[in-house]
Amino acid sequence: MARVFALLLGIGLAVSRPEARTGEDAELKQCREWIQGHSQPSAKRSALIKILSPRTICFDGEIFPSTLKQANAWADRPAKPRGRPRLVVRSIGGDADAAMDLAEKLQRLDAEVTVVDYCMSSCANYFFAALRTRRVTPGALLLFHGGYSAKDRPETAEWLDKALRDPAVLRSVPDPVRWRENELKRFDRSVNRQNALYRRVGVDSLVVTGMSSVDEKAIPVSGCGTRKDAQRAFLFLNTKQLRRLGIVIEDGKPSIDPSEADRRLAQFGFRFTACAAPTTYFGAKPGKATQPR
């Protein structure tokens, strides 16, 4: 699977609305209905946020520092809510570091997450996998396509060297040597930060770092979307595979229908499709996930 630095961007459209689960409380229902009551914001780098209470926040849109200001302020509030704080989210993803900023705060609050309709890319990596208590509404999609991996450091260095051969880049970088060094340090910090997020909740970082071990061309046609011009760029996992990596879902089951994933990705205008992760999924075995500290 190709490594992706600028995590998924795009335009979201309205999707089918699954039935509410039995036992859905009033605030969760209100969040879900609010999210499903409108199309995802069409402008790039935009999102809609609704704060229902000190306990519950609804987020619908792309993940960037600018779109998470209210969410970060909500997570930083001094007042303690009644009940475990929770994020109810629908997102195609966005900036990985911005997602980790909020995920770290949510971890400190021992918050839970509920996915409505879909959670892709940095949403799946950090809002879903990195929180201890996870729920999904019926038929919701969880799509992963990689994150920061120490194995990608040589490729990152190569990319930086290539960038520095561009005269336009050189004109904008006063000290190329220091710039390259600082970018690699920032990459290393992101790897360590990401892996610490997973380690604290007992999740195997293979959920994102294992992408390079997957030969997407070897996945059977039946396990992928059917668009011929679509790159195989995302993976979805069944609940057994998720558990093997330490990702336990408290309530609900994510969709594992490649046709449904492909349909939704096509709606967003993405030239990507999703495939079922290989049965052994990166070679992870029960008990391999690191334990919470």
Image (spheres, helix red, strand yellow):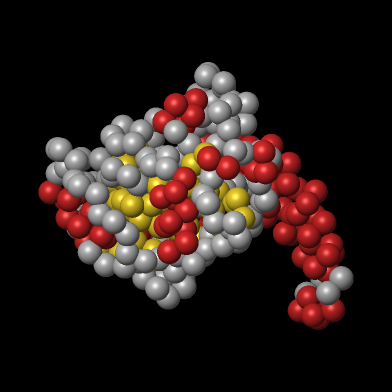
Residue 162 is situated, as x and y percent measured from the top left of the image, at 83, 65
Say above or below: 269 vs 224: below
Name the image quarter holding residue 69: bottom left
Residue 248 is situated, as x and y percent measured from the top left of the image, at 39, 30
Residue 194 is situated, as x and y percent measured from the top left of the image, at 56, 44
The front one of 85 and 34 is 34
Left or right placement of residue 223 versus residue 18 in this view: right
Name the image quarter holding residue 77: bottom left
Left or right placement of residue 286 versus residue 249 in this view: right
The front one of 285 and 258 is 258
Say above or below: 59 vs 189: below
Residue 230 is situated, as x and y percent measured from the top left of the image, at 59, 58
Say above or below: 250 vs 263: above
Say above or below: 67 vs 263: below
Left or right placement of residue 84 versus residue 249 in this view: left
Q: Residue furthest right?
A: 165
Residue sitting at x 59%, y 56%: 228
Residue sitting at x 83%, y 69%: 164
For the image, the number of numbered tags is 0
Residue sitting at x 51%, y 49%: 225
Residue sitting at x 54%, y 25%: 289
**Is residue 293 visible in the rendered structure shown here?**
no
Q: Residue furthest top?
A: 287
**Is residue 271 visible in the rendered structure shown here?**
yes
